[in-house]
């Protein structure tokens, strides 16, 4: 397969109350046969809505992901769990939005023993489970590490700040540190952070090789591979040289700023490596028995010298990482399952990371856990719009720099910042995708309704406010 290496009348009808739906199939869902597919869930880090060719990018080459979209379904109204790494990934893993989930901002919190993850559900369903890449939800010695949260195998970064460095002095396999030849001066708030003075092993390359090896070893039975890559996150500690990549590749001679060459090279390198992964499925003749998801954890960043406006990384959307405007939370989502997904389809279904829990449970033919905010979007993946249930609303709350709340209900979107106390901004996304015109003053009834949604969605927590 490898082509190249390198969307008032606030309608409640038809909507399902978030948190009350738990998909509980005990037999094969409609449209599936007796084969239980393997699942690969790939998450890029800080990749913008507009950074892929299939989502409008014209300068950065992403042929393999564009081909994946041509063979599957492209979701244009899909949202990350949050606008920064840790809470977004927590939503993905637990199926609870940030009004309910434990981790609601970036920091050093760990998942608890009582938290139930997607991996735990799939492991109970008989899947072999692996996490290769960036975790960010549990630190060494805690109950939050992957091998204590449903994963049979882990290789990569536990600490999200450690993951800034593409040339770390070590990575972690299961619960043990694996030394690397890279030399990183001591310092920072985590051993191995910073900028390497001797660069040998590029961590992304190591993650890809581990992923390929896992597929080789697991090909004969259903597996779940969670592949949260670090590209194209910046090494924040490296200043304007933070777009770390071994080579600029096809962009070396472009008349662009160096950070932009680096960003483009990182994305195209990832695209080529994902092409290798998809090729491996074909080599093992399991491509029709494997459903592949690709997305990003939040919007594009402005670190490491990167300028998100240079490539129009947020596309037609307003805002970037750390915003609850669309550009900070609406992300590309591609799902491909050869023979099952309608090729080249575009879905406007409104979903979020919280929905992954119910979706993979339905795919696996098991019950989704109770007390989640998850609605399976498998019908939309299979092209069955009539059977696709809809959320009444989606909700976000974010703590840290730029704290805010947001709700999306049908075409309406509200943003309140700072959180709990700020003025309400209201946007009609069907007419104003770029959130340029605040229409709160003209739609007081809609604002009041959505304020009630905010109150309904928020559950107090002693650990709301964490340092970013």
Image: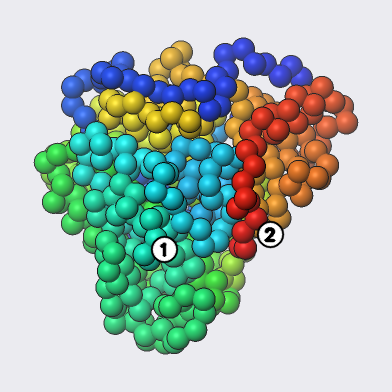
Q: How many marks?
A: 2
Give the residue pinned by disc 1.
139
Colour scheme employed for the rendering of this structure: rainbow
User: Is 248 located above or below residue 414 in the figure?
Assistant: below
**Residue at the (47%, 27%) spot, across then down:** 375
* Element assignment for label 2: loop
Q: Is residue 50 left or right of residue 335?
A: right
The residue lying toward the viewer, choosing from 398 and 274, is: 398
Work out which quarter of the rendered image holds the C terminus and state it.
Answer: bottom right
Which mark is first along the chain, 2 or 1? 1
Tell which tag, 1 or 2, sits nearer the viewer: 1
Q: Is residue 204 visible?
A: no
Q: Position of residue 432 (x, y in %)?
A: 72, 34
The residue lying toward the viewer, choosing from 395 and 204, is: 395
The residue lying toward the viewer, choosing from 177 and 310, is: 177
Give the numbered dot on residue 307: none
* Element assignment for label 1: loop
User: Is 386 located above or below residue 242 in the figure?
Assistant: above
Q: Is residue 51 left or right of residue 40?
A: right
Q: Quadrant of residue 356?
A: top left
Q: Position of residue 40 (x, y in %)?
A: 30, 43
Work out which quarter of the rendered image holds the N terminus and state it.
Answer: top left
**Residue at the (46%, 56%) spot, across then down:** 110
**Residue at the (31%, 41%) spot, across then down:** 120
Q: Position of residue 427 (x, y in %)?
A: 75, 34
Q: Is residue 113 visible?
A: yes
The residue lying toward the viewer, choosing from 283 and 200, is: 200
Give the residue pinned by disc 2.
401
**Residue at the (24%, 60%) spot, across then down:** 210
């Amino acid at each position: 397969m490898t082509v190249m290496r390198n969307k008032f009348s606030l309608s409640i009808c038809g909507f399902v109350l978030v948190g009350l739906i738990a998909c509980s199939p005990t037999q094969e869902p409609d449209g599936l046969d007796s084969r239980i597919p393997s699942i690969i869930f790939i998450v890029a880090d800080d990749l913008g809505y507009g950074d892929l060719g299939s989502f409008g990018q014209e300068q950065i080459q992403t042929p393999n992901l564009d081909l994946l979209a041509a063979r599957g379904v492209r979701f244009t109204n899909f949202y990350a769990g949050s606008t920064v790494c840790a809470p977004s990934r927590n939503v993905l893993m637990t199926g609870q939005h940030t009004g309910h989930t434990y981790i609601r901002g970036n920091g050093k919190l760990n998942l608890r023993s009582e938290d139930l993850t997607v991996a735990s559900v799939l492991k109970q369903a008989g899947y072999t489970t692996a996490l290769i890449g960036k975790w960010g939800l549990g630190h060494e010695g805690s109950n939050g590490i992957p091998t204590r949260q449903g994963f049979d195998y882990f290789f990569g970064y536990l600490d999200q700040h450690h993951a800034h460095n593409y040339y770390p002095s070590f990575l972690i396999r299961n619960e043990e540190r694996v030394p690397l030849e890279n030399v990183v001066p001591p310092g920072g708030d985590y051993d191995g952070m910073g900028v390497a003075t001797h660069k040998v092993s590029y961590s992304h390359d190591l993650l890809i090789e581990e992923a390929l090896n896992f597929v080789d070893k697991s090909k004969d039975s259903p597996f779940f591979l969670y592949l949260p890559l670090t590209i194209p996150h910046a090494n924040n500690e490296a200043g304007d040289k933070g777009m770390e990549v071994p080579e600029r590749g096809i962009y070396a001679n472009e008349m662009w700023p160096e950070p932009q060459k680096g960003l483009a090279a990182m994305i195209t390198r990832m695209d080529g490596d994902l092409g290798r992964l998809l090729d491996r499925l074909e080599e093992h003749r399991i491509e029709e028995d494997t459903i592949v998801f690709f997305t990003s954890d939040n919007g594009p960043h402005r670190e490491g010298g990167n300028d998100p406006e240079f490539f129009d990384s947020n596309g037609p959307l307003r805002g970037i990482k750390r915003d609850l405007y669309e550009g900070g939370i609406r992300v590309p989502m591609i799902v491909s399952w050869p023979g099952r997904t309608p090729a080249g389809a575009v879905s406007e279904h409104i979903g979020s990371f919280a929905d992954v829990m119910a979706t993979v449970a339905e795919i696996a033919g098991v019950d989704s856990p109770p007390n989640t905010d998850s609605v399976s979007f498998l019908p939309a993946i299979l092209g069955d719009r009539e059977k696709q249930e809809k959320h009444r609303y989606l909700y976000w709350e974010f703590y840290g720099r730029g704290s805010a709340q947001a709700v999306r209900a049908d075409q309406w979107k509200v943003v309140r910042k700072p959180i709990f106390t700020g003025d309400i901004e209201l946007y009609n996304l069907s007419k104003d995708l770029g959130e340029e015109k605040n229409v709160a003053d003209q739609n007081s009834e809609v604002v009041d309704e959505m304020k009630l949604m905010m109150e309904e969605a928020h559950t107090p927590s002693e650990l709301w406010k964490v340092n970013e």
